[in-house]
Amino acid sequence: MILLLAMFASLTIMSLFVTNELSSLNRKLSSREIYVYPPLKKEVLTIEDLDIIKNIDHIDYVGGKIFSGSIELYIDELNKPFSEASINVTPLLDSVEPKMVKGSGNINNGEMICPVNFYPYEVYYFDDKKDEDSEETDEVFEMKKKIIKSALLNSKDFIGKTIAGKYSNYDYRIDYETYKEEYNTKDFKIVGAYKESYTMDSFNTCYVTKEDFFEMASFQNQKKKEQEINKEYSGIMVLIDDYKNMSSVHQELNKLNYVYEDHQEVDKADKLFFTYAPMFITIIIVLIAINIIYNFNSKKIKGRVSNYVLLKSIGYDNKTITINEILENVICYLISFILSLIIFIICFIYIKTNFIASYVVLGYLINIPILAIISIFIIVLCLLIIINNKLVAKKIKRSVLEMMRNEI
């Protein structure tokens, strides 16, 4: 049971990282975004440049960098005692097709679609510490480390509802000496609910039209100096159809001498640590399990030679004796596996609820690795049967007389 629990934990760490890494590359829009800038000897991209870039294979969308990212929209009517309500508003680009669960994915100006698991509230990381000057009570602070299930909005309740949003011109790059925060308001009608796990969006990410997003983004940037805006948006954002085609697009941009950077880059150090380390640990545990299985069965079978003599004397054949021994071990293994799995599931749910709720809300896929657990179950079961079969066969292949002599 202890070894199985250790294997489950190791496989879960590896599986969660690999699943989220691969899924984010294929599902998240940011992983398919490339920022393209003028060649080194040019200051801005011309219309001819845009036409050339649009004709590159595997590029689905070409637009301003202003459409990359999101804007925070405050919804006062959804506020709860433990948290204010806010939505991350992002533009629904032409090539983006969220997987709809309810309602319509075709939106007009003044409309939005939100996640089917809609949670527009703040969730702290489990290791966050309360600031000394914070006005929050300890109870509220601890509540924000979990997902309050009663606060999850049901799609039946919010589809068709019009919400009043408030957004500010806040931007951390603005000169604070002359900065004065201002707010603007805009109403949106929620017309659909999409499956957020399909695009790995956070539980408070809602899509609006490009026109609505541009209107809000322009208000947010109106306080910035003109030269800062020109510098930031001198390039464009392109969206690739599939992450696997990123390298070919890179090659084409290199040929055309454009300067570019990927919006999201893979951290190779994390990738190595969270894949190979758990894999190595799992292999070590499996080897330990093989050693325990072998030693346990070897000792048990040596002590049962007299039983085998008796069984063979009254007519049992070698195959039946071997099957009985295998069944005994398999039953013991099944009991251990079921108990280990129950303990693991309880621990997994507890950790997910109390320690990694913030990652769940941010859109990470935190699920029990069923395929990995089934695989380890089959592997250990096969090893158990093979080892037991070889040890028993070695003992009972001799005649009853030879076995009695050796026993004496």
Image (cartoon, rainbow, N blue to C red):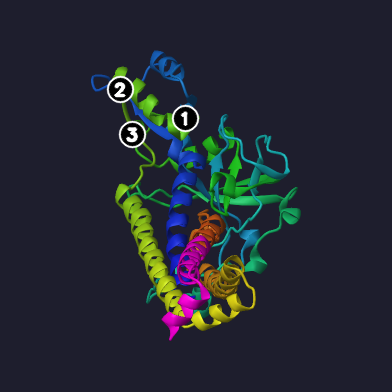
Tell me which secondary structure the magenta stretch mostly adopts: helix
Residue 302 inside the magenta-drawn segment: no
Residue 61, position in %: x, y?
A: 50, 27
**Residue nearest the observer in this picture, 108 or 294:** 294
Provide the secondary structure element on which disc 1 rests.
strand
Res. 254 mark: 2
Specify whether residue 272 is in view: yes
For the magenta stretch, what is the residue range? 380-408
> Percent from the top left, x then y, of residue 94?
57, 29
Q: Which residue is mark 1?
A: 240
**Is residue 397 rendered magenta in the image?**
yes
Residue type at the position of mark 3: Glu
**Residue occupying image coordinates x 58% and y 60%:** 85
Q: Which residue is mark 3?
A: 261
Residue drawn 52% across the image and 67% down it: 352
Q: Say which of marks 1 and 3 sits in front.
A: 1
Image quadrant occupied by the C terminus? bottom left
Pointer 1 and pointer 3: residues touching (CB < 8 Å)?
Answer: no
